[in-house]
Image: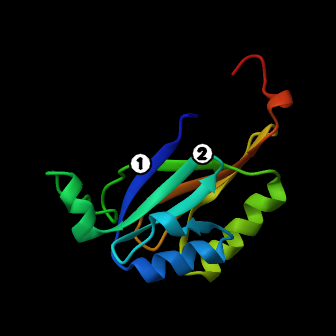
Amino acid sequence: MKTKIFLNLAVKDLNKSISFFKKLGFSFDAKFTNEKGTCLIIGENIFAMLLLEDFFQTFTKKEICNTTTTSEMIAAISVESRDKVDEIMTAVVKAGGAAHNEAKDYGWMYQRDFFDLDGHHWEVFYMDESQIPTEM
């Protein structure tokens, strides 16, 4: 079995979160979806479980962080082109998310970041690995 990664994220409104990520072009795995959560498909072996806060809380004794004041993580997703980065960011803003920081262009890597409806921090980037500088 190949290694897979499942991020688990607490959300306030599951239907709004599903709608938001669909507007960004993502899909969901129906076999891991019910009224408490859903499985956002990010890549072949990369997923985010969007779980209603009450259900998420059953997996931890810690408090759910307040994403308006605390960073819990930054989930970075690579895409196939610079244009795709900008396309996703346009969709983010139209879908109600918030762009964060200015675009960063390193020549070999281009990145932008945003907050989703629940304040989770995401980064979308394109990287041309053949152009990575030998000294950074």
The label nearer to you, 2 versus 1, is: 2
- Observer-nearest of 95 and 2: 2
Q: Residue at x 23, y 53 (%)?
A: 59
Q: Residues within 10 Å of mark 1 (few under 14, many from 20)?
A: few
Tag 1, which secondary structure? loop
Residue receiving disc 2: 45
Name the N-terminal-most of marks 2 and 1.
2
Spot the residue most to the top: 135
Instruction: Decide if residue 12 is on the left or right side of residue 61.
Output: right
Q: Quick check: 94 above or below 51?
A: below
Relative depth, front residue between 109 and 75:
75
Identify whether 42 is placed above or below 130. Answer: below
**Cα distance between the residues tagged 2 and 1:** 19 Å
Q: Nearer the viewer, residue 94 or 38?
A: 38
Q: Which residue bears the numbered disc 1?
A: 73
Q: Residue at x 80, y 37 (%)?
A: 108
Q: Position of residue 83 (x, y in %)?
A: 83, 60
Residue displayed at 40% across by 74% down: 34
